[in-house]
Amino acid sequence: MSYFKVGEECILQSKLCPELNGDCTVIDVLDDKPRRKHLPNGEIIIEGGCSYIITTKHLEGWSWAEEALRKKHKPSTKSLSSMIEELNIKSKVESK
């Protein structure tokens, strides 16, 4: 099962290509099947799991493993002080 969905905003955090890191959007989710992964040292390994095509400038046909992507959380609409106030109110109600 895929952790990311098509159209979802995420953050690329690649160890192999840090110059490409940043915000992106998932364009396509590739099936969970064994794939060849080419490492910079020329080594090729076989790994499974979902891969993703994303909106970032990279070589044509590159897909990114789930471990290179992070969820992009939506910013809160509440201020810190209002969240603390809500928690204080809830704790007072629960303690009674």
Image (spheres, rainbow, N blue to C red):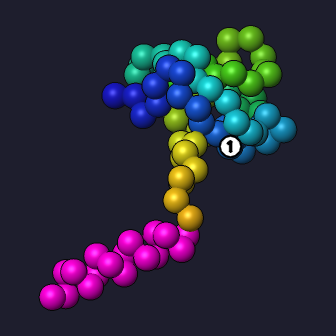
Q: Position of residue 85 (x, y in %)?
A: 43, 76
Q: How many marks?
A: 1
Q: Residue at x 54, y 21 (%)?
A: 7
Name the outermost residue toward the bottom.
96
Magenta segment includes 53:
no
Q: Taking 12 as reference, is 69 left or right?
A: left
Q: Is residue 35 visible?
A: no
Q: What residue sits right under mark 1 in the picture?
A: 13
Magenta segment includes 87:
yes
Which amino acid is tagged 1?
A: Gln
Q: Is residue 84 visible?
A: yes
- Choose between 21 and 40: the one closer to the eye: 21
Q: Residue at x 53, y 28 (%)?
A: 8
Name the outermost residue toward the left.
96
Q: Position of residue 96 (x, y in %)?
A: 15, 88
Q: Taking 3 as reference, is 79 left or right?
A: right
Q: Residue at x 54, y 46 (%)?
A: 73
Q: Position of residue 9 (x, y in %)?
A: 58, 32
Quadrant housing residue 13 = top right
Rendered view: 96 above or below 20 = below
Rendered view: 77 above or below 18 = below
Local packing at callout 1 (Cα closer than 10 Å; few below 14, some 14-19, many 20+) is some
Name the outermost residue toward the right.
19
State the SS at label 1. loop
- Choose between 12 and 64: the one closer to the eye: 12
- Choose between 9 and 29: the one closer to the eye: 9
Quadrant showing the N terminus:
top left
Main SS of residues in magenta: helix
**Magenta residues, as a range?**
80-96
Q: Residue at x 69, y 21 (%)?
A: 55
